[in-house]
Amino acid sequence: MHHFNYREGVLHCEDVPLREIALEVGTPCYVYSYSTLIRHFRVMDEAFSAIPHLVCFAVKANSNIAVLKALAKEGSGMDVVSGGELFRALRAGVDPERIVFAGVGKTAQEMEYALRVGILMFNVESDQELETLEEVACRLKIKAPVALRVNPDVDPKTHPYISTGLKKSKFGIAIEEIVEEYETAARLPCIQVRGVHCHIGSQITQVAPFVEALGKVLGLVDRLRGLGLDISYVDMGGGLGIQYKDESPPPPAELASAIRPLLEGRGLTLILEPGRVIAGNAGILLTKVLYLKKGRVKRFVVVDAAMNDLARPSLYGAYHAILPVEERAAGAMVADVVGPICESGDFLAQDRELPELKQGDLLAVMSAGAYGFTMSSNYNSRPRVAEVLVSGDRFWVVRERERYEDLVRGERIPRFLLSEQSS
Ligand SMILES: *Cc1c(COP(=O)(O)O)cnc(C)c1O
């Protein structure tokens, strides 16, 4: 469900025609629907209302501080994976006690930052990380709240780049070894064991992998409690998929009814870290047709957005629906939609059925609200695009388009290059 619909032949975000945004803000730009965002959050939150739970939005999916603020006002916590994301969450006014911190490479500096602000929990991914956290916490005379991230060896049946819970993955600690690691953690004076964390992957379209993972996690919780450890949180990560094309991922309510019975009466608070399912279909990338080009064997639609703006098609071969802002039936042509970047991998769609297009037409690249702007870069020295938030019939630029000056900010030419050249 989202709020991008045609009205009288013109694609709108909520009550705002997208061409109005293109006219005022320019293209390319990301456009987010506030109503969609918070609807997705509420559906997730309400699905689990019968059990103690905390929904921590995965900031890496969409880290604009207006988006974070909108979710925080709904009561969302945040899942962060870097000091920068923690900074963003705090800047958006998120209560640190609703923030969890994951990632295999947290630095001592990031740990100190998170300890000082008092986050809910570190999701620790290795023995050396645990040792470092212990050192930092002792130095600050603080007890670091932790969950260890277990790698449950569950196949989420998704793209290999976004599978994170298999034996061969860099994430988490093997389930066979983790009890020992917990015993170590429990002995460390500046570590306070609070929970178990796991996150098996992303864009998961079935309930079964979650149930399988939770089963393993709960078995672990029982063993840990048997050893006298105080486990009060089970963090099941994120990963619920969305519809990009013809997938039919389970709605949050279905996930909830599958896993709720396993949790009831256990005195555990469930943490969820959804990213894509909250933000994915709440955003689009608005772009303009620059040129139509006929190659020897293929047709190309050259648009002003590129792989640096939306990396998913190039990176994962991901499918994003592309709709004309002025409604027209697809099928008039088959073409690749490509950007201006000097790479053959720079495409937003390949061999796509499209309506007849002309120069200047506006296109909406759908389902781009998660892992869209956050994965964007300045490759080819392209300024990063503007982000716009729509609510009802109003819209706001929530991130300005970068200017050329932004591209070179922080760069310097060393003096020796400036002095007169002598030969
Ligand atoms: C990426 C990630 C998430 C969010 O994943 P989605 O598929 O966007 O829901 C949650 N938790 C962790 C630890 C992650 O790395």
Image (tube, rainbow, N blue to C red):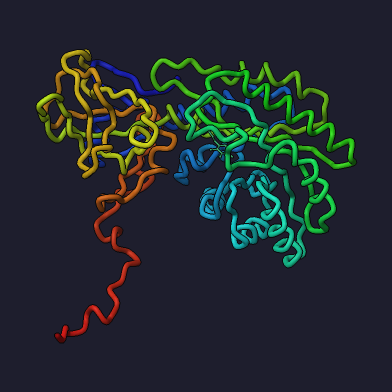
Give the residue displayed 24% in from the left and 36% down from the top.
22
In x, y percent, where is residue 387? 35, 42
Q: Is residue 75 visible?
A: no
Question: In the image, is 229 to the left or to the right of 74?
Answer: right
The answer to whether residue 49 is left or right of residue 9 is right
Along the horizontal axis of the image, is 15 left or right of 356? right
Q: Quadrant of residue 273?
A: top right
- Tell me the quadrant of the picture where the N terminus can be found: top left
Residue drawn 38% across the image and 19% down it? 245
> Could one spot residue 324 in this view of the protein?
yes
Residue nearer the viewer, 66 or 351: 351
Q: Position of residue 328 (x, y in %)?
A: 20, 16
- Give 109 or 396, whichever is nearer the viewer: 109
In the rendered image, which quarter is residue 309 located in?
A: top left
Q: Quadrant of ligand 1?
A: top right
- State which quarter of the image contains the C terminus: bottom left
Q: Position of residue 408 (x, y in %)?
A: 29, 62
Comparing 314 with 304, the one in front is 314
Q: Which residue appears at 42% of the width and 43% of the height?
A: 374
Q: Residue furthest front?
A: 168
Q: How many marks?
A: 0
Q: Locate residue 156: give its quadrant.
A: top right
Which residue: 19% across, 19% down?
Answer: 334
- Residue 286 sits above or below residue 66 on the image: above
The picture places residue 414, in percent across and down from the top left corner, at 29, 77
Q: Is residue 6 left or right of residue 61?
A: left
